[in-house]
Amino acid sequence: EIDRFLARSIEIRGGKIDQLNPYREMMVGFTKNMDDAAKLQWAKLQTYIALGQLMTTAAVLGIDACPMEGINPTEYDRILGLEEKGLTTSVACALGYRCSRDKYADAPKVRFDESEIITII
């Protein structure tokens, strides 16, 4: 996958593949001591970067987003046919527009104070 990604980078950005050798070596070095379970865990955590971008973009467009964990990944995989594609579910996010009849839409939000959840170092 590393070489495929680098080839795609050259296709999009131009340049020569050998210019990316230091970057390739860094990525290979990072992943070479990982077993498959560690690679999968790392990849699952990377989905949160994409999730953040999805939610930010949705907010800019005025679309509501509800990220979800606590889901049944095996069932998602089955329904979506992901296993056959070598994929698995790590998180889900519902997108849409709130219902104008939602009695909770304008209710005060329950949030902890910033000082309780953020530590500035």
Image (cartoon, rainbow, N blue to C red):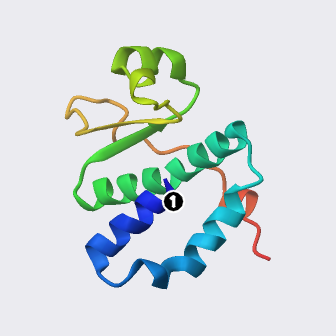
Front residue of 65/30: it is 30
Q: Which residue is depicted at the point 55% across and 32% down? A: 69
| Residue 97 visible within the image | yes
Looking at the picture, does residue 35 appear above or below residue 21?
above
Residue 35, percent across and down?
74, 42
Numbered-mark total: 1
Q: Which residue is depicted at the point 45% across and 22% down? A: 83
Give the structural element (helix, strand or loop) at label 1: helix
Residue 98, percent across and down?
25, 37
Quarter occupied by residue 103: top left
| Residue to which mark 1 is pinned | 2
Q: Which residue is depicted at the point 31% across and 59% down? A: 57
Residue 87, percent across and down?
46, 32
- 119 to the left or right of 73: right
- 58 to the left or right of 87: left
- 53 to the left or right of 34: left
Q: Which residue is depicted at the point 22% across and 29% down? A: 101
Quarter of the picture containing the C terminus is bottom right
Looking at the picture, does residue 70 appear above or below residue 106?
above
Looking at the picture, does residue 89 appear above or below residue 50?
above
- Hey, what amino acid is under mark 1? Ile
